[in-house]
Amino acid sequence: MIKQLRVTVLSENTAGARGLLSEHGLAFWLEADGRNILFDTGQGMVLTHNAKALGIDLASTSDVVLSHGHFDHTGGLLDALKSFRRAKAYLHPSALQPKFSKGADGVMQPVGSPVPRLDHVSSHLEDVVLTTAPVELADGVWVTGEIPRATGFEDTGGPFYTDEKCTTADPLIDDQALYIQTPKGIVVFLGCAHAGLVNTVDYVARLTRQEHLYAVLGGMHLVRASDERISKSSDAMERRNVQVIGPAHCTGRNAAMHLWRRFPDRCVECTAGARIVLE
C-alpha cells in the first residue's frame, strides 16, 4: 500500500500556470512513497520543458508506464529515455505496432508511437516488462494489462486501424490503466480508456475486490460519445463512489462539463501543472 501519493500533470491539452506549455497529449508524474513513476509521456513537445519548470527531475524516474501506443502518449518517450538512469518500462506487446486513424475527410493519419521498435526502448532501460495481464510494479502499485470489454455501449472511441488502408479495425488491446492502493482507497490513472471507462473501473474493482474506488484521473475518451454513453459513464462514477474525479485530455468538453456539473465537489483540474495530493 502507498501511504503518500503526489500527482503532477506534466502534459495535457491545456496548461494551468505561467511558463508551462500544453499539447494534445497526457503525462502524469507520480511520487509514491519515494518511487517516481512516469505514466505516459505526451506527444513529446512539452514533457521535458514542463518537468524542468515544475522542478521535476526525470532522471529520478523509477518506472515508466505506457497506457497504450498512440503518439500523444508515447511521443515523449525518446526524450525521456535520455534522462533516465535506472528505470523499468511497462507496456503491452502491441503498443509499438503501427497504428492509424481516418479523419472526417477520409484521409488516413498515422497515430502510432514514434518509437519504431522495442529495442529502441530496451537499450536505454534497466528492464522492459510486457503487460498482457496485471503486473505489480511495487507494493500496492499495479498495471492492469489488457482490459476485458464487457459493456455493450462502449467502443474504442474512434476510427482506429492497424493498416495504412484503414481496412482492419484496431481493437486497441494495448490499452491499460495504472492503479494504486492507498489508505483512502484505490486510485486509478487512465491514458485514454480506449477499453471504455466503465470497463476499466469495473475491471479494477474486480481485481482489487473493492466495490468502491477513491479516485479516477486521466483521459476517458468520451470526446465522441453519445449522451447516453456519457450518462452511463457518469453513473459508474456514482456507483463506484469515486470521490476524486479528474477528467483530462480526450474526455471531451461535453463529458467533462457533465461530470463537473454532476460532481462539482469531487472533480479536480487536470491541466498541465496541476498538483494533486492523495494521501
Image (cartoon, rainbow, N blue to C red):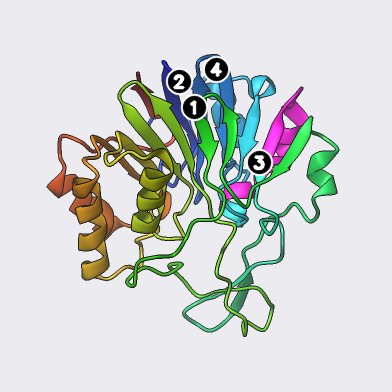
Horizontal placement of 86 versus 8: left or right?
right
Task: Inspect the image, locate mark 3, and give the three-letter code of the amino acid beneath it.
Answer: Tyr
Q: Is residue 87 above or below residue 69?
A: above
Mark toward the start of the polypeptide (3 vs 1): 3
* Disc 2 residue type (three-letter): Ile
| CB under 8 Å between discs 4 and 1 | no
Asked if residue 274 is positioned above or below residue 255 in the image, the reply reads above
- Which residues lie in the magenta part? 73-90
Given the image, on which type of amino acid does mark 1 rest? Gly
| Residue 55 circle label | 4
Q: Are marks 2 and 1 in contact (CB under 8 Å)?
A: yes
CB of mark 3 within 8 Å of CB of mark 1? no
Percent position of residue 144, x then y: 52, 46
**Residue 20 or 168: which is nearer the viewer?**
168
The answer to the question of whether label 3 and label 4 lie on touching residues, with beta carbons closer than 8 A, is no
Q: SS of the residue at dot 4?
A: loop
| Label placed on residue 2 | 2
Q: Which residue position is annotated with label 3?
A: 90
Compare marks 3 and 2 and give the one earlier in the sequence: 2
Decide which of tag 2 and tag 1 comes sooner along the chain.
2
In the shown orientation, is residue 72 left or right of residue 270? right
Considering only order in the chain, which callout, 4 or 3, is on the residue closer to the N terminus? Answer: 4
- Split into 4 quadrants, where in the image is the N terminus? top left
Q: Nearer the viewer, residue 196 or 220?
A: 196
Amino acid type at mark 4: Gly
